[in-house]
Image: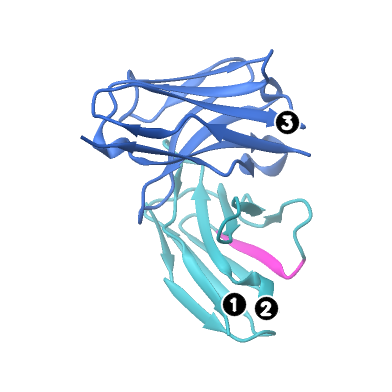
Chain colours: A cyan, B blue
Amino acid sequence: VLTQSPATLSLSPGARATLSCRASQSVSNYLAWYQRKPGQAPRLLIYDASNRATGIPARFSGSGSGTDFTLTISSLEPEDSAVYFCHQRDIWPMTFGQGTRLEIK
Amino acid sequence: EVQLVESGGGLVQPGWSLRLSCAASGITVGSYDMHWVRQATGKRLEWVSGIGTAGDTDYRDSVRGRFTISRESGSNSLYLQMSSLRDGDTAVYYCVRRLWTAGGGFDLWGQGTMVTVSS
């Protein structure tokens, strides 16, 4: 089970966002992060815990291993408003977190 | 343009069957691991099934024996044949590509097709 926190995060443009994903057992580094905006398909941001996917801005970074993972957005922009969810592929069946809603106020 | 477009969803009664399709453009479905992921309203995403480039298939326990994933090169499409549908299968179903050069992440998603199982 992947548990994300907080459920909702409200921050100002330019601020730093820290999103957490905790696994109930170790998933090694086989964790990905996605961004999902209303009406759009999810977008892969980070894979294998810390690798940015193609075309993802450097302000997005991932860290962690085992059971605790973090997605950091270093300097928020208005377009970062979205739901962010994590995904593990180490333990069958692969599972997803419930998501963190990030609001840019 | 690279995209996946799902179709075939609808309202069916428990026990009925439905076939979902996913038409790919800009990619060849047979060249990638392809999966179906679903999301019920208010619930988290849930992996349903996958098919590898070698044709190997996998299913979550709750759908094994009821769902069949397949692909067809001629139409460049992915399919999910669903039978003996249950209320718990109600969800939006997404066709996704798994990219091993992106750590096995799902890098391409369709917009989804809604399946409602209700009497």
Question: From the viewer's perspective, is the residue at label 2 or at label 3 nearer?
Answer: 3
Look at label 2 and name its amino acid. Answer: Leu
- Going from the N terminus, do you reach mark 2 or mark 1 first? 1
User: Is circle 1 on the same chain as circle 3?
Assistant: no
Q: Judging from the image, what secondary structure is the residue with disc 3 in?
A: strand
Chain at numbered mark 2: A
Residue A69: percent from the left, percent from the top?
A: 53, 62
- Residue B52 appears in the rendering: no
Residue B14 quadrant: top left
User: Is circle 2 on the same chain as circle 3?
Assistant: no
Q: Which mark is residue A17?
A: 1
Q: Residue furthest left?
A: B119
Residue B87: percent from the left, percent from the top?
A: 25, 37
Write the residue at 52% across / 41% down: B112
Position of residue B75 in the picture relative to residue A83 (left or right) = right
Look at label 1 and name its amino acid. Answer: Ala
Q: Judging from the image, what secondary structure is the residue with disc 1 in?
A: strand
Look at label 3 and name its amino acid. Answer: Ser
Task: Check contact, mark 2 vs mark 1: CB within 8 A.
Answer: yes
Bounds of the magenta span?
A58-64
**Nearest the eye: B50 or A72:** B50
Residue B66: percent from the left, percent from the top?
A: 33, 20
Write the residue at 69% across / 13% down: B74
Q: Which mark is residue A76?
A: 2
**Nearest the eye: B44 or A61:** B44
